[in-house]
Amino acid sequence: MLMDNEFCSAFKGDIIGKEIIYLDSVTSTMDAAIEIGRGGDNFDGTVIVADVQTGGKGRFGRKWISPAGVNLYFTVLLKPDFRPENASMITITAAVAVAKAIRQYPGLKAEIKWPNDILVKGKKTAGILTEMKSVAGLIELLAVGIGVNVNMTSEMMVSDIRDIATSLKLEQHEDVNRITLFRGILSELEKYYKILLNGNKGALINEWLSLNSTIGRKVMVRNQDSVETGVAEGLSDQGALILRLESGETRTINAGDVTIL
Ligand code: BTN
């Protein structure tokens, strides 16, 4: 069911939130957003938010647990005028926006684990999934999906994530208002997305560095076909992780799962 509610009027920026579409239930806001993007050209800044997802998606084909009435699940559609190889800067931008917003409200010390995990006290409380459609070296559509465990209880988490995941309520010991947080994230996203569009990647990377818990640490990076261990040395200007291996060589890693050792 499509309805007008508090989510729809939570935020209206120059770009982000031009239109906010609320759906009670979807398979995934990613699929709903991509469908909307396919239907026309005028989607830049449209946000699709749902109360529950029946097939919430995480990175690498994982499930994103999405019970009703407790968390935030939304996807922001964008059509930036830059080349596909710069698209991972959007994940960096979104991670900064989510961490900043959580630090403002409810005021917890959120940290970013490269590339897309938002941690509170070392446990994952939010994740970002970016999907892109590009044609002939141009971005046609970017769908930036954000999921935040807001008021989820540990009983709602499947047992294999209970030790590594948390929610804002579990850390704050009181209910957190989803609308206030949604507004805060969209407002920070508008701010940092404009910085990205203005070409000020350096400022964005510095902001990311000030919020991250990865750089300087010994890490293991796992992706579909390899596992590498080394010291996370920095971020490239396209948002990739620079890893110094024990051999002294450096690797630039575009995608993967980081474990801090
Ligand atoms: C991850 O950390 O693996 C990414 C999780 C992204 C979850 C969000 S919830 C809103 C949007 N819809 C989805 O199905 N996934 C993203």
Image: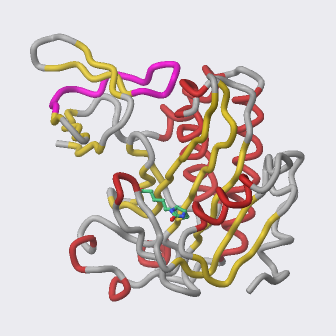
In the image, taking residue 194 as reference, residue 259 lies left or right, namely left
157 shown above or below 40: below
Secondary structure that dominates the magenta span: strand
Q: Residue at x 28, y 80 (%)?
A: 158
Residue found farthest to the left: 247
Q: Nearer the viewer, residue 226 or 42?
A: 42
254 shown above or below 248: below
143 shown above or below 66: above
User: Could you tell me which quadrant the N terminus lies in?
Assistant: bottom right
User: Could you tell me which quadrant the C terminus lies in?
Assistant: top left
Q: How is the image coloured?
A: secondary structure
Residue found farthest to the top: 248
Q: Residue 182 location in percent, x, y?
A: 69, 66
Q: How many marks?
A: 0
| Residue 74 belongs to magenta span | no
Q: Quadrant of residue 28?
A: bottom right
Q: Residue 250 location in percent, x, y?
A: 25, 14
Report the span colored magenta: 228-240
Q: Residue 131 location in percent, x, y?
A: 54, 47
Q: Nearer the viewer, residue 216 or 241?
A: 241
Q: Residue at x 53, y 83 (%)?
A: 174
In the image, taking residue 246 as reference, residue 10 lies left or right, namely right
Q: Residue at x 34, y 80 (%)?
A: 157
